[in-house]
Amino acid sequence: MLLPGSLILDWAGPAEAFRIANQLLVAGGLPPRFELRFIGPQASPTSSVGICVAGVTPLPDRLPAGSWLVLSGIAGRFDLASPDVAATIDWLRRASPAREAARLVTICAGALLAAHAGLLRGRRATTHHHHLDELRRVAAGCEVVANRVFVLDAHLASSAGITTGIDLALHLIAQECGAALAARAAQTMVVALRRGADDPELSPFLAYRNHLHPALHRVQDAVSADPRRAWTATSMAQVGHTSPRHLTRLFVRHAGTSPLQYLRRIRLAVAQAALQSGCGVTRAAELAGFSSDTQLRRAWGQFQMGGRPSDIARTGERTPAAA
């Protein structure tokens, strides 16, 4: 949803993340998962940097079920007396996103629009640090969280703003399409994946990726896409077009771990997900590429995953992943 004066990076960054996710899915023979639409009270609003955005469609009577409504900030503060702002807030009240039919995503001061429409009551949310006090005044019944990259609360997802909108978009892509695809999208965008301070530890699919080395990314992509393969240091080095010894040096230097340790972390993540979905230990080990449940248990203890794999299989509870 675009208002006049919208901050381009607030909405263009996340939009590009969704577009790139689609591009990667199609390249892998899968259908796209996102359809981008731009709506607003004006057909051609002028952005924060003076560029006029064309082709914005009118605010719809209702949001399609399953849609995500992204509210971005503007340059300066919202003028509640502005006909465009007033019409948008009134529309938000009637459209009622963040309920069962749609997800509400706010970026930067977009949270203030949601607050004025009464959509944050009983929720946790964040916004840009310049707007935190204002959000506390406006958002009655909302727990305003400071010092967070983004905050997730049921059908509401809010980010601190500007570049953190990309962080939030990548996190939502990971939820929708898998962590491996989100990591590839982040790599394509040349951004580092971050997390909110109260979010769980990064998935191993997302960790070890804060680098720009193409050979290393090729190996990580291949391992993440097919962890069950009988990987060795030699076969991974072949993917990276380097020697096993040099690949190990690259992993240690850029990812802070070794190739085989990285492989075990990916396999543990797959096994943990399988256990949480109801698989037994033997089946989870098989799905993850471990040669036996004994090998899975050994790796589980080595990485201090907490408890035992059989405990997860019985309860389905998530254990904290070791860094």
Image (cartoon, rainbow, N blue to C red):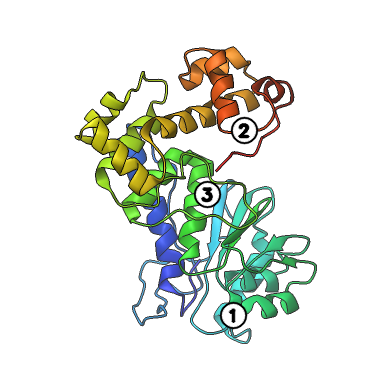
Mark 3 surroundings: few (<14), some (14-19) or many (≥20) residues within 10 A: some
Cα–Cα gap, marks 2 and 3? 25 Å
Three-letter code, disc 3: Leu
**Quadrant in which the C terminus appears:** top right
Mark 2 surroundings: few (<14), some (14-19) or many (≥20) residues within 10 A: some
Which structural element holds mark 2?
loop
Say whether residue 157 is visible: no
**Residue matched to label 2:** 305
**Residue matched to label 3:** 172
Q: In the rendered structure, are the residues bearing label 1 and label 3 in contact, judged by CB atoms less than 8 Å apart? A: no
Q: Which of the labelled discs sits on residue 150, or is there none?
A: none
Res 250 → quadrant:
top left
**Residue matched to label 1:** 130
The front one of 7 and 183 is 183
> In the figure, 134 relative to 287: above or below?
below
Q: Residue at x 24, y 38 (%)?
A: 246
In the image, residue 177 lies at what x, y percent? 47, 39
Q: In the rendered structure, are the residues bearing label 2 and label 3 in contact, judged by CB atoms less than 8 Å apart? A: no
Mark 1 surroundings: few (<14), some (14-19) or many (≥20) residues within 10 A: few
- The mark closer to the camera, 2 or 1, is 2
> In the figure, 147 relative to 186: above or below?
below
Judged left or right of residue 261, residue 133 is right
Mark positioned earlier in the residue sequence (1 or 3): 1
